[in-house]
Image: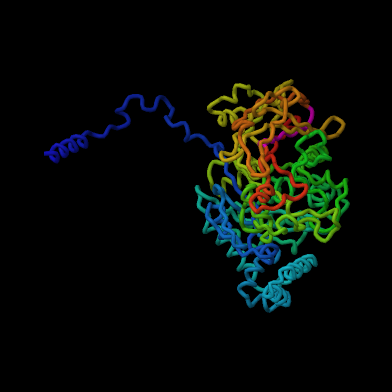
Amino acid sequence: MFRPAFLMAWCVLFSVPTLAQEDVPATQPGERTYSPYPGQDFPNRVLFGDTHVHTTYSADAGLIGNRLGPDEAYRFAKGGTVTSSTGVPARLARPLDFLVVTDHAENLGVAPLLAERDPRLLETEYGRALQAAVDAEDYAKAWEIFSLTKASGEDPLADVPGVYDSVWQRITEAAERHNAPGAFTAMIGFEWTSAFERNNLHRNVIYRGAKATADTRLPFSAYDSTDPEDLWAWMASFEAATGDRLLAIPHNGNLSNGLMFDDVKLGTDQRLDADYAARRARWEPLYEVTQMKGDGETHPALSPDDEFADFETWDKGQLGPAPKTPDMIPREYAREALKRGLAWDAELGANPFKFGMIGSTDSHTSLSTAQEDNFFGKVTALEPTADPIRFEEVVGGVGGEETVAQYAWQTSASGLAAVWARENTREAIWDALARKEVYATTGTRIRVRVFAGYAFEKADLQRSDFDAHGYATGVPMGADLPAGPEGRAPRFVIRALRDPDGANLDRIQIVKGWLDADGRTAERVYDVACGGRRLLKSGCEAPVGDTVDAASATWTNDIGQAILAGFWDDPDFDQSQRAFYYVRVLEIPTPRWTTYDAKFFGVERPEGAPVSIQERAYTSPIWYAPGD
């Protein structure tokens, strides 16, 4: 009895004629469409990733124990469990959105070729010497052979046909295998490892395109040249030949002994000129401001009025034994370089140091671990262990006096690159990097938005269409703010949301740098929002506090706030002065990785190691110039 009734109802239902749109009154009034989104094209999501990871294909990783290749690096970044080279299972709390494997161009792939006993390598004296050291498990000897040969500037494998081509194609093939547009982006890249007189001038080169164009040329290496101007020329030639796009990201100016942001061209006494400034700004739109080898935002000697300036500071020397002198420091840190860039712009009409800011890890374990409770160290030998090497290995100032040594415990569990984009694709991420709509974090996944303009109001912080209004009314991080109405100062609206699995926020700050009428640069840090306490004219009324318990390596979110928003109208604005503004967001204190390690392994925390750390984010600046 049920079946006929059911069939009758089915027939009646599906015998109703389909209504044409014109038969339905006022479906789309006027020229409007119901969905508000088809016309939206502004970036509406933040993606977190790492633009700086080394695998066994980097000689300074593979020759000292890293056995994991690009496949493992991508699988780990996508959220998979990977066993580290020392046998420790590792996994991220949450997957990354994108990853760039940036293996060193110099002697690319020598370690896996040795593992395979590649006959082309063993036909060379260099290859045989390395193979003997590796077979004897004398990794110190293998490292010595590699580093001394590299320091000579002569590539020992330059005349071995096809050896680098085969390795580079493996790397680009891995990127193609793991690239899944919309879900996870595997970008192609490499590191150009210039170490002029052992000073760090390294750059990571990032491709916008795919394997087809990347394979047409081998990566440019320090054997080809240690001068960044030659790297830029190679990049220009590559773009002209392939139609692909490239950008380069310098890092660790704090280990350059004053060369990263110098006033003269490398190895000369020639002052920078307009052509140099324009080319550097074109090819190097970003700076990796925070990573394992120290934080590079600013230094207490440069920013004495900034209470948060002394953060994860490496300031004793360079990678080798040469000590640092005080005159080098102003040419090593991002904030000071941004200030000096204003002066160069006034003099040359071009700014060589007009860069946005990102973070990344510089991991040499193939594992992008930037969380304090999940830190696998800089290199394989420093992966999680109770062995004293985890804390005590000398990793900076190698071969120098005690006064220049930097130890493994001083390594930072940092950082991440945050990118504002509309799609999780190579093209969308690269374009965001190129236009500088990005920010750095020290490993946390704080979400930060900032817009600058002249018509914003405090009430805009509560708008449901905050992003759309921000783009319509002003400019985002990484952009230039045009001159406004006479007598009107720039206004900023900022929103910050804590890492969903992380700590509450302490405060939002704006860092301003400017060039005065006498050609002098200056800076000031302004508090614009405080978590859980009042904002006074002088700043947050009190420190946020500290809930960290060192013995248990725990903390609580009883202090600070999960969401902060700030409206700021520059009280010291001078329409005739060049300036930049960037946002710094601080979390409440949480345990540093050395505190987690001390609890987990039952060892003493290293003397001098902080119990807690205030993770943070730095946005790319917004620049203002008179008449722009």
Q: Is residue 153 above or below residue 282?
A: below
Q: Residue at x 74, y 61 (%)?
A: 222
Q: How is the image coloured?
A: rainbow
Q: Position of residue 379 (x, y in %)?
A: 68, 59
- Can you see residue 424? yes
Q: Position of residue 248 (x, y in %)?
A: 69, 51
- Can you see residue 250? no
Q: Say which quadrant the C terminus sits in.
A: top right
Q: Nearer the viewer, residue 146 or 586?
A: 586
Q: Is residue 428 above or below residue 192?
A: above
Q: Nearer the viewer, residue 301 or 163?
A: 301
Which residues lie in the magenta part?
576-588
Q: How many marks?
A: 0
Q: Main secondary structure of the magenta part?
A: strand
Q: Residue at x 72, y 51 (%)?
A: 604
Q: Say which quadrant the N terminus sits in.
A: top left
Q: Residue at x 72, y 49 (%)?
A: 605
Q: Is residue 111 left or right of residue 311?
A: left
Q: Nearer the viewer, residue 239 or 532?
A: 532
Q: Position of residue 456 (x, y in %)?
A: 63, 24
Q: Is residue 346 above or below residue 148?
A: above
Q: Residue at x 63, y 78 (%)?
A: 119
Q: Position of residue 88 (x, y in %)?
A: 59, 59
- Quarter of the image for residue 159 reads bottom right
Q: Is residue 433 above or below residue 213?
A: above
- Quarter of the image for residue 549 reads top right
Q: Nearer the viewer, residue 564 or 449?
A: 564
Q: Is residue 40 left or right of residue 430?
A: left
* Magenta-colored stretch includes residue 415: no
Q: Is residue 623 left or right of residue 96?
A: right
